[in-house]
Amino acid sequence: MRPLAARGRRFLRAVSLLAAALCCAGRCIHDVTQRRVDTATAVRYDGGRGVGRSGRPPPPPPRPIRIATHFITVPNMVLSHVDRVRLNNSIQQAVSLLAKLLAVIPVVDNLLLSRDMNEYCKSVWRNASLPNFNKCFQRNDNYRKETCLDVVIPDDHLQGYSVWPGQGNSPTVIQEDGRGVPNADLILYIKAADTSKCRKERSVIAYAAYCKLDQNGRPIAGAVTFCHSRLRGSAFDHRRTMLTTVHELLHVLGFSKDLYNTWLDCASAPSIGMNCSSRSSVTNTDDQGSVRIYTRTVIQKMQQHFNSSSPELGGPLENGVQPGFPSSHWESRFLQGSIMTAAMGAPEHTFIDPITLAAMSDTGWYQVTYDTTQPLVWGQGQGDTFGLTSSCHDNSSEYFCTGSGMGCHYLYLNKGHCASDEFLDGCRVYKPLVNGSECWREEEEEEEEEGRRAGGASRSGEIYGRRSRCFLANLTRANQTSDASEPMGGRCYLHRLAGAEKEFQVQVQGSPWLPCRAGESVQVPGFRGVLACPGGRLCRRDDGRPPLPEARTPRAPGTGPASSSSSAAAPPPPPAGGGGQGGQPGGRIQVGIRVRESAECAEMEEREAEGAADGLANVTAIHRCHIRNPHTCSSLELCLELWEYAGCSQHSVPSLLQRLEKMIRAGNVQLKIAGKTCTTVSIRSSSGSSPPPAASTAGSVVAAAVCGSLGAAVAACGWLGVAAYRKLRGGRGRVHANSRRAA
């Protein structure tokens, strides 16, 4: 029996996770919000310098896409400084990532968007014999604005408009041209609001649409609306928001069912977007009645992924509300884990994959770089029949399951239960649980440790931590009585690679490291039952998984909490080639952050410093690679070093410190310490390696809210209740939905 304190904390965290899952589970309604765009903006693309052998200027070289972001302020819905900083950091990280992946022929002049004549003009000249045929001769007096989704486009970003006489070249100018947006290939309008769409779908994080196209059909303007309630306090998740932004931007950039018929075939063109051919068809229906994208690069990447030479292996699209009609998402049965499926999983389960980028390449507008993509794990090498509803029920694939038992999610990061959903068409998979399923989370390991200290070793010998993974096992300690053998289910144990590609070792609580070859079973000394060694997905050295959220390395099995003298795990080293000379840091500053003393936040132990630093990175949107050597200066003060790495981000140490100081002075920084939410009240700093000067009352002390327990966060979404647990056990949030399917 787990001690009451540990069980209570796990219960509170479970409810908190349930609330977060519902509040932030990532729905997006692109196919509902997108409207048809018929008008085009003429954009100038210059050729390169010099003259080629053909006597014509060579095509301009593609450059990384420049996405200019423009925030729109909504009256009575202004983001706080900390919320705006966090949102902006997530957006800019998404924009930077796409600039590494996609290149376009750059726009030469300031990007100036055209107006919709159907909106500003009441009547046009219809007499074809007139020199001003089809030009506006009567303005619409009710015309006030040009919109993109539900955002008003500034006049400064728009071309002007005029009314024309029947004869002559002297129109009456109603609105002059704006200045346009410099250094931009796409303008992205961003606002945070509590819209009716947000209120209707409580799990929506954001939704987006494109609104302006150039003469080649490429989107050059779009908008993303972020639901205000998903950006505040503990409801905000940096990585989920960043990936949601990438998902929505890919819709804006061309992965949208209403743009498929405008994609270009540039296989024989001199450059992308230059003298390309129109495609006769992008989508078609396969023998199973599913719609697929049949373009050259998509087929090639699908064949590579599934190890098949079938020309029928196009990119499968979500069935949608009306089978036989295309949607703007991949079918989850075939490409689960892709950034562009209709159900986006947790950040550590989501991949920016080559098949999605192949689709972007086949638009004809983008040159794609695949170097930094993450290869899909789901279905890899499984052949061209993988994912069919006719084959997912016969236990022929380790990716699907039958029944409703417990097992492991296919990435082995989580325990799971066998279940289906509206995107699987009756097929069943091991879906991650919400409570206690993340084998890699040290918080779970800490609670197991507390249980062992108070009530003895755990029955199944589980170990949670960064190196732990899910194994199918039925281990029980030999010295514990049991009337029947334990059923096989997902259990969390340590693992490490050893030697060959499919060889690794596993460790159960109190056991030595044991060899574990794929497909074999292991008997553990001191335990009844067996541990099954999974296939190659677990033991590949480069499995392409997205990185796990920052956390500490687990303690050794059977040891107590780390003391001040123990060797704490250091944050990850700076990226190769980072700032300074030879990848060395460009600078560092010692920082001390003090929290308000209260009955609950009475002291901070050394073992809690790493976790507090992780929380600080999340709440301030300062990348964790900038935060080094966190430790406790006193029971109420967290000390750390801010390091500058060019390979980490573009922020300098002074700018990072300025951000911290401003947020703490505003009372907007709270740290998670031993499960409690504690408010920071002051910050002090010094350059170099010496410790910060002693804090004084003359320091920058900040008024802030009272430190509250985790229970306060639970109360904020208390209406969700434990009753939602069964519904959320799958742990996946729908990205897009408006009925049974996303359409």
Image (cartoon, rainbow, N blue to C red):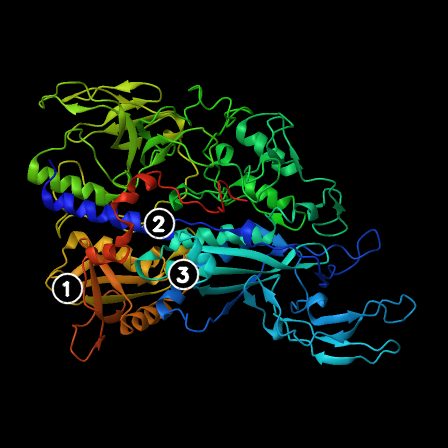
Viewer-side residue, 724 vs 102: 724
How crowded is the residue under tag 3: few (<14 C-alpha within 10 Å), some, or many (20+)?
some
Residue 116 in the figure: left or right of residue 321? right
Are dots 3 and 2 in contact, CB under 8 Å? no
Label 2: state its secondary structure: helix
The residue depicted at 11 percent of the width and 46 percent of the height is: 5
Amino acid under disc 3: Gly
Viewer-side residue, 253 vs 368: 253
Discs 1/2, front = 2
Q: Earlier in the sequence, mark 3 or mark 1?
A: 3
Tell me the CA gap for discs 1 and 2.
33 Å
Tell me the CA gap for discs 3 and 1.
33 Å
Amino acid under disc 2: Leu
On residue 580, which mark appears? 3
Are dots 1 and 2 in contact, CB under 8 Å? no
Label 3: state its secondary structure: loop
The image quarter in which residue 406 lies? top left
Amino acid under disc 1: Leu
Going by the picture, which residue comes out furthest to the right?
A: 129
Image position, residue 601 (x, y; %): 14, 61
Instruction: List the residue tagged with mark 1.
Output: 636
How crowded is the residue under tag 2: few (<14 C-alpha within 10 Å), some, or many (20+)?
many
Image position, residue 89 (x, y; %): 42, 61
Tell me the CA gap for discs 3 and 2.
43 Å
Quarter of the picture containing the N terminus is top left
The image quarter in which residue 168 lies? bottom right
Instruction: List the residue tagged with mark 2.
Output: 22
